[in-house]
Amino acid sequence: MSEAADTDVADAIDGEAVDVTALPRSFLVEGSGPVTVVRDHGDVTERTEGEVSISRRLETLDGFATFWAFRDLRNWKRNAIREVLEDHEDGSLRYVISDDQLEQWDVQVDGRAQAFIGVAETIVDGEVADNFEAPDHRFESYAQNPSGRDVDEMTLDFAKDLKTSPLWGPGTRLAELTIRHSKRDELEHYVGELLEEVSE
């Protein structure tokens, strides 16, 4: 998915409007680590070692769904980094990350509790664009909401999916706490999980 897919509401491609599902609150992908920068100058290829930082706001359901799908992949870190770095590559510039370099990378997606609730509200309120294509069948089921989950149930499902993933930050547990607090659930266990995560 290109960065253009994460713009506000619509872009024009060949004069046609592309309908996307904007989220009420965005998420932020951030990371940094070593890379090999490969520049092709005709017959000469130049390789230099360096450090880069990546940052991308996820402002659409498509963007959220893409990084949601990375959550339990064995190569989640490489997928997340490549998804952002590809926006900065062209025919003469590439970023190569070896396995050793990848180990040194830190990358995380996070958002406020209200951002996760906003995703649930978007789906439950039927605001998903007709042309939305989910990255996998499970997220497609979320987007269609055939069982009629309400916002609280949908938010808790997202939190359950994401809170154990090393890619997703403590906002997932905060979203879970917010919903469980509103339902007057016992919170000691959930607060303990959150404190354990942020103290790591």
Image (spheres, grey):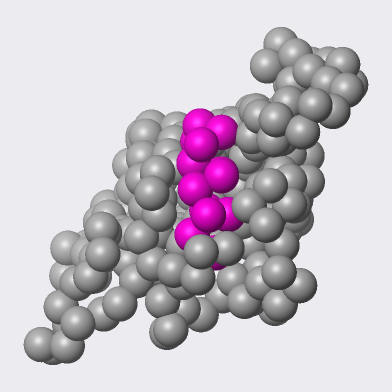
Q: Is residue 107 magenta?
A: no
Q: Say which quadrant the N terminus sits in.
A: bottom left
* 161, above or below 114, in the image: below
As rendered, which of 168 and 104 lies closer to the eye? 168
The prevailing secondary structure element of the residues shown in magenta is: helix
Horizontal side of 89 relative to 147 (left or right) equals left
Q: Is residue 178 left or right of residue 63?
A: right
Q: Nearer the viewer, residue 200 or 116?
A: 116
Part of the protein shown in magenta: 111-123
The vertical placement of 199 against 186, above or below, is: above
Which quarter of the rendered picture does the C terminus lie within?
top right
Question: Of 92 and 164, which appears nearest the observer?
Answer: 164
User: Looking at the image, which is closer to me, 117 or 89?
Assistant: 117
Q: Position of residue 159 (x, y in %)?
A: 71, 43
Figure disc tally: 0
Residue 175 in percent (x, y) is at 64, 34
The image quadrant that residue 143 belongs to is bottom right
Residue, x 49% and y 59% (percent of image)? 122
Residue 133 position (above or below residue 105)? below
- Say if residue 66 shows up in the picture: no
